[in-house]
Image: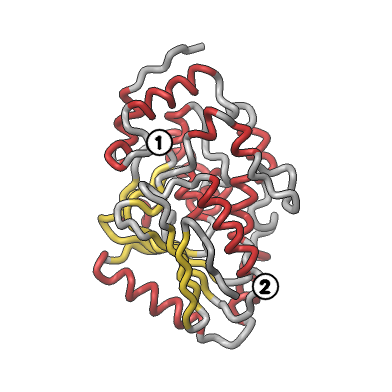
Amino acid sequence: MSYSGYKSLVVRVEDRIAWVTLDNPPVNTIDAVLAGDLKAFADEAASDEDIAVIVLQSADPEFFSAHADFEWSFDPSTLMALADPDADPALNPLQQLNERLRTLPQVTIAKLRGYARAGGVELAMAADMRFAAADRTWLSQPESLMGIFPGGGGTQYLNRLVGRARALEIVLGAELFDTAVAERYGWINRAVPDEHLDAFVDALARRIAGLPQGVAAAAKEALDAAEASGPVPHLAEEASAHAKVYPSPDDVVHRLRVLMDHGGQTRDGELRLERLLESIPWAHRS
């Protein structure tokens, strides 16, 4: 497998481990380019028996992935154009992408530094495990401040990881979570001191990659089967509910345009995204 030709990913394969680095400046927004590259990588990796572990990481220490592209709110057809004809048509394109990654036979690990919000943290939740740089990583599902809610699998992934009550707190409270709380809630596996994170993930990936062929994939299959209702059973229901708020009404689109005018999807604006969103009044309230 070549794992080359990507515009927003750098892939290095060594000792049965694929190190997949998100590199989509300025803030690793999940846009059409990054989504396309992730799908292309997943399609190639799915049949590669020489890879046992996939590590998702970022080239930018301040942003794992800011969120999905705000432009999709202005023109929803650009998102729907990414739909995979071979995937479940009941799911939206971001759900299809995250499920493509989540169901890979390899063990997937998200190594987190910086901000992971909305679609970015949904991407991390699609991985089998998440390890974060302590006090250098922040997670958020701020979609409710934009007049929507997580629709790339986030509601279902959160419920599995943290439970319903905490998932509601995360989704409706729309606050930034530091690594201490995220670890306590189960949103991440473990917060690791920043200076030790690379070595920790490297050692874990190498232990898994060194297992006999097929052991890790079989263990994943068995653990998924332990969930009585099946792995992530209600994505279609999430998609149906999300259709009630997206495409967005005019006041939500206006709010996002104001956000863009004040720095949305720029580095400076994204560092204070929640504060920016809270400062923008809603144009209309029903």
Classify 117 as above or below 146: below
Q: CA distance from mark 2 to mark 1?
A: 38 Å
Classify 155 as above or below 132: above
Residue drawn at point x = 59 percent, y = 60 percent: 102
Residue drawn at point x = 59 percent, y = 88 percent: 212
Tag 1 secondary structure: loop
Which is nearer the N-term, disc 2 or disc 1? 2
Tag 2 secondary structure: loop
Residue 184: give x, y in percent of width and height: 37, 55
The residue type indicated by label 2 comes to Ser
Residue drawn at point x = 33 percent, y = 39 percent: 266
| Residue projecting furthest to the front | 5
Q: Please give left or right for residue 99 compared with residue 174 in the image.
A: right
The residue type indicated by label 1 comes to Ala
The residue under label 2 is 47
Residue drawn at point x = 60 percent, y = 36 percent: 78
Residue 66: give x, y in percent of width and height: 40, 45
Classify 55 as above or below 188: below
Labelled disc at residue 174: 1
Residue 250: give x, y in percent of width and height: 53, 17
Q: Nearer the viewer, residue 178 or 122?
A: 122
Q: Is residue 255 visible?
A: yes
Label 1 crowd bin: few (<14), some (14–19), many (20+), radius 10 Å: many
Q: Please give left or right for residue 132 compared with residue 13 in the image.
A: left
Q: Please give left or right for residue 13 compared with residue 99 in the image.
A: left
Residue 36: give x, y in percent of width and height: 58, 53
Q: Is residue 180 visible?
A: no
Label 2 crowd bin: few (<14), some (14–19), many (20+), radius 10 Å: few
Classify 119 as above or below 225: above
Quadrant location, the N terminus: bottom right
Q: Quadrant of residue 223?
A: bottom right
Which of discs 2 and 1 lies nearer the camera? The answer is 2
